[in-house]
């Protein structure tokens, strides 16, 4: 029998670790964009765009990947 991997209990550090890391990277990118006027602006642009890229990945790509592995989900590929 298959157990749901997504329904396991998690600690607070497991829940909030990656959102905090993404938030800190974004804040560092914003501060760097305000204070630096050279080639490091590209790094700050990437840091500010990171939450958008992650959101687009989970909105566009992740449901299609999960549909292959979870039975009974809408949009599942038929054989």
Image (spheres, rainbow, N blue to C red):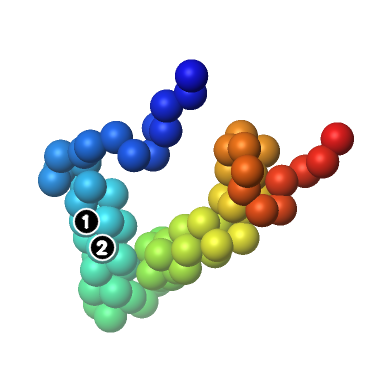
State the image coordinates of residue 54 (x, y, percent, origin top left): 47, 58
Would you say the residues marked 2 and 1 are in contact, meaning their CB atoms lie under 8 Å apart? yes
Residue at left 82%, top 41%? 78
Q: Please give the label number shown on residue 20.
A: 1
| Residue 51 appears anywhere in the view | yes
Q: Which residue is mark 2?
A: 23
Residue closer to the observer: 56 or 63:
63
Q: Is residue 69 left or right of residue 44?
A: right
Mark 1 closeness class: few <14, some 14–19, many ≥20 residues within 10 Å: few
Q: Is residue 18 left or right of residue 50?
A: left
Query: What element does badge 2 sit on?
Result: helix
Quarter of the rendering containing residue 67:
top right
Give the vertical position of 45 relative to 8 (above or below). below
Quarter of the rendering containing residue 32:
bottom left
Residue at left 20%, top 51%? 16
Residue closer to the observer: 76 or 14:
76
Give the vertical position of 45 relative to 2 (above or below). below
State the image coordinates of residue 46 (x, y, percent, origin top left): 45, 63
């Amino acid at each position: 029998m298959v157990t749901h991997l997504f329904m396991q209990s998690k600690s607070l550090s497991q829940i909030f670790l990656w959102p905090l890391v993404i938030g800190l990277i974004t804040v560092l990118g914003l501060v760097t964009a305000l204070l630096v006027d050279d080639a490091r602006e590209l790094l700050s642009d990437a840091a500010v765009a990171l939450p958008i890229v992650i959101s687009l990945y989970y909105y566009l790509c992740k449901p299609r990947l999960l549909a292959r592995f979870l039975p009974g989900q809408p949009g599942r590929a038929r054989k």
